[in-house]
Image (cartoon, grey):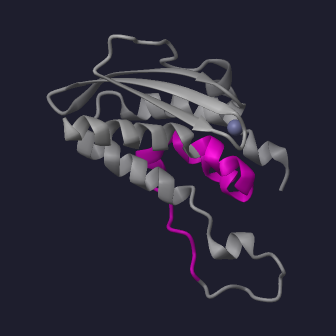
Amino acid sequence: MDLKDLYRDVIVDHNRNPRNFRAMPDADRHAEGFNPLCGDEISLFVDVRDGIVDDVRIAAQGCSISQSSASMMSVAIKGKALDEVRDIAREFKSMMSIHETTIGGDGTEAGDGAEPEPVDEKRLGDLAALQGVVKFPPRIKCATLAWITLTQGLDELAER
Ligand code: ZN
């Protein structure tokens, strides 16, 4: 396992050319996220019309994983119904969760045979490229920051 597995082309591309990166101060909903482990920061701006994510903008500073993940997220959720956005967020977070067998590593047990859920690459699109991050546990928070921020923003929106 080397870093090439982590920085796949699609991740590098989103990092170099982040999508929807521009502050939108007049957005319906604004959420902030911070990952103290790495220093990643994100501001998320979302406009919702008739239960659909009409527009999403991001202002972010941080490592390439956090930036790429935020960029991919903006592409994945734009134009989607809120229910679907929540489904994708759930699926992404479950893809990024650490499985016991992954962090074990003493090699004496092959695990109980519990395999991670297969990822729906069609649904997640470019986001599936971030699956390799799971093998680098300190970076998982970098990849999930944008999604945690999004979920919090949506929850606040729902309470209005
Ligand atoms: Zn980071």
Of the pair 14 and 51, the residue shown nearer to us: 51
Q: Main secondary structure of the magenta part?
A: helix
In the picture provided, is 1 more to the left or to the right than 91? right
- Give above or below for 31 relative to 58: below
In the picture provided, is 100 more to the left or to the right than 149? right
Give the percent coordinates (x, y) of residue 84. 28, 45
Q: In which quarter of the image is residue 30?
A: top left
What residue sits 53% from the left and 42% below the top? 127
- Give the total number of marks visible in the rendering: 0
From this viewpoint, is residue 10 visible? no
In the picture provided, is 97 more to the left or to the right than 30? right
Of the pair 14 and 89, the residue shown nearer to us: 89
What residue sits 54% from the left and 31% below the top? 70
From this viewpoint, is residue 100 visible? yes
Quadrant housing the C terminus = top left
What residue sits 35% from the left and 28% below the top? 78
Give the percent coordinates (x, y) of residue 16. 68, 20
Q: Quadrant of residue 157?
A: top left
Quadrant housing the N terminus = bottom right
Of the pair 160 and 5, the residue shown nearer to us: 160
Quadrant of picture, ligand 1: top right
Give the percent coordinates (x, y) of residue 129. 61, 44
Residue 137 shown in magenta:
yes
In the picture provided, is 120 more to the left or to the right than 35? left
Give the percent coordinates (x, y) of residue 148. 47, 44
Magenta span: 114-143
- Give above or below for 22 relative to 47: above
What residue sits 18% from the left and 33% below the top? 51
Residue 102 shown in magenta:
no
